[in-house]
Image: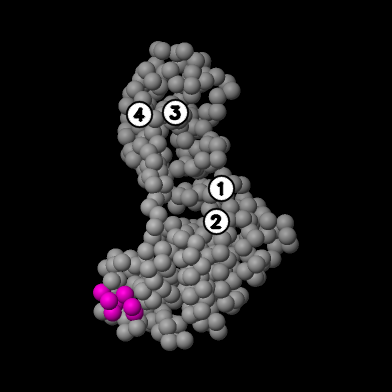
Amino acid sequence: MWFSNQLLKWYGANKRSLPWRQTKDPYCIWISEVILQQTRVDQGLPYYESFLKKFPDIESLAAADEKEVLKSWQGLGYYTRARNLHFAAKTIIDSGGRFPETFEEIIKLKGIGEYTAAAISSICFSEPNAVIDGNVYRVLSRFNGLGVAIDSCKGKKLFSSIANDVMDKSNPGDYNQAIMEFGALQCKSSNPDCESCIIKSRCAAHETGTVDSYPVKTKKVKQRARYFNYIVIEGDRGCFYQKRSAKDIWQNMYEPLLIESNKHLGRNGILKSEEWLHVFGNQEDVKLVPSASLEHRLTHQTIKARFWKAQTNFCSMNTKSPLEEFAQEDLKEIPIPRLIEKYLELSG
């Protein structure tokens, strides 16, 4: 109990004032937890507020068009999160409209894993289920001096067991928020504030001077490079965009004509590509002007994008082409990846 009591004491004195800490509404907690996956609090806060303003309850989210949901999520990345939220909201409505109240029920919703189910069930319904995220792994591994890799099967089982053993089962919601907040603000991954740490007297890593050695990981994320050649085609009304339908990054979002290749293409490579030929056939009276080059990093891949502006004969466009023409003002209404948004900002 000493460990949990110290963390709860620290949390009471140091916790940040955040809107999702002012409610026990499972819908609000759910939205906050999903947004904060892979997203810093300072970045996620305005999205949380705008998302709830647009979709204040499960009913409004379930009734929305997916395009609206993706547009509201634009800039956060990991768009599968938004699609899963939308799908799960419709599932809840179809099941009677009541948000599930137990870990076992909550985890059945699409896109919800053990961490999110534990967070919602403990914060909203006081179920004693310990959350385990990067902050929790870091705090527990340092405090206990655990050299077991957190990304191994053995490590995951061990940390899950420890996390549930040390939690305050009479106050699981606050305890879970306390240990995550402690990891985010005090026991940080770099430059942790050990001198003012409330648990340093019993911290194994602090005692042995090995704080920077924890947590231990065995796997390194492998990055792969992808080359995107975007053709920005402007018509009388605006620009031509296509919807990404494949099960890949940015599914169901919009972008200019894309030609993906194993390296950046020049003019001849573009005109000979399958994507260009499908839209314009063998047209060669085309003016292609290099416009911009951007790099966009995702978790497992880096997108190396080159944008070209095209001037061509639109009358000969294939009517079965996936491209749709959008007026410039309409681009503000359709969901586009952050990479495309950055290009539009750059090109003015």
- Compared to residue 142, the image places residue 323 above or below, namely above
Q: Would you say the residues marked 3 and 1 are in contact, meaning their CB atoms lie under 8 Å apart?
A: no
User: The residue under label 3 is which amino acid type?
Assistant: Ile
Q: CA distance from mark 4 to mark 1?
A: 33 Å
> Which residue bears the numbered disc 2?
54
User: The residue under label 2 is which amino acid type?
Assistant: Lys
> Which residue bears the numbered disc 1?
68
Q: Quadrant of the C terminus?
A: top left
User: The residue under label 1 is which amino acid type?
Assistant: Glu
Q: Would you say the residues marked 2 and 4 are in contact, meaning their CB atoms lie under 8 Å apart?
A: no
Where, by quadrant of the figure, is residue 195 drawn?
bottom left
> Which residue bears the numbered disc 4?
264
Judge by depth and name the residue closer to the eye, 200 or 6: 200
Mark 2 vs mark 4: in front: 4
> Which residue bears the numbered disc 3?
259
Where, by quadrant of the figure, is residue 143 drawn?
bottom left
